Image: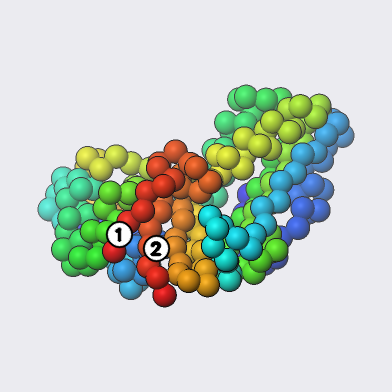
Amino acid sequence: MKVRVRCFAAAREIVGSGELVVDLPEGSTLTQLFDQVQGQFPRLQGLAGSLLFSVNREYAPSDKRLSADDEVALIPPVSGGADV
Amino acid sequence: MFDITDRSLSLEPLVSAVTRSSSGAVASFLGVVREQTRGRQVLYLEYEAYREMAIPKMREIADEIRRKWKVDEIAMVHRIGHLEIGEASVAIAVSAPHRHQALAACAYAIDRLKETVPIWKKEVWTDGEEWVGPAACDGGVAGSEFRVSS
């Protein structure tokens, strides 16, 4: 199934785009989605402990099961800290 | 009135929008960019929003307020984009028959907005930068001192 993933703030900068479409097995959870996206963008690991998720514009726990065409968002509360 | 805008903010349109003949008080809040945060010199801020979720979350806060206090109307507008020191980032106005309800509801509105509305600011300092998002600003619920090492 295909799920739309919106990326904001530090997550958007790491992914290099505000939006991804991720292909997942039916019944996958948010955790499984994040693992897959993180596999593609390893620097997301740095956000993993603080990240919140939304599904269809509501905050959702990481064990929530996803359905085709859901809109997930990666919502980092605090992130970055990179010195420039 | 609940909105996300890339234009400069002022309180007057919100105050006008919420004032009713039943209103005896209008409480308002304007958040502005300050020059220092946590002891670091701010150059500018960049705000971004998950607009399609942020506006419904603002409406939910207004619903919470109506369950807690007798108010007339509520307006919230958040700015996004590049903001310089001294510019307004968020404006809130709440009208009520009496001042205590208006003041309490306005304070609640900005606290909840920072906790739940998906809007981020990138603080750009003279010596670094950091994104701050919902539930993280000003000692929010999700661990304000959490820092990611990268």
Same chain for the residues under marks 1 and 2 in the image: no
Q: Position of residue B71 (x, y in %)?
A: 72, 30
Chain of the residue under label 1: B
Q: Position of residue A50 (x, y in %)?
A: 33, 49
Q: Residues within 10 Å of mark 1 (few under 14, many from 20)?
A: few
Q: Residue at x 57, y 66 (%)?
A: B41
Direction from residue B108 to residue A84 in the image, left or right: left
- Give B124 or B134, whichever is nearer the viewer: B124
Above/below status of B36 relative to B68: below
Q: Amino acid at mark 2?
A: Gly
Q: Position of residue A47 (x, y in %)?
A: 30, 56
Q: CA distance from mark 1 to mark 2?
A: 7 Å
Can residue B92 be seen here? The reply is yes
The residue to which callout 2 is attached is A81
- Labels 1 & 2 near each other (Cβ < 8 A): yes
Chain of the residue under label 2: A
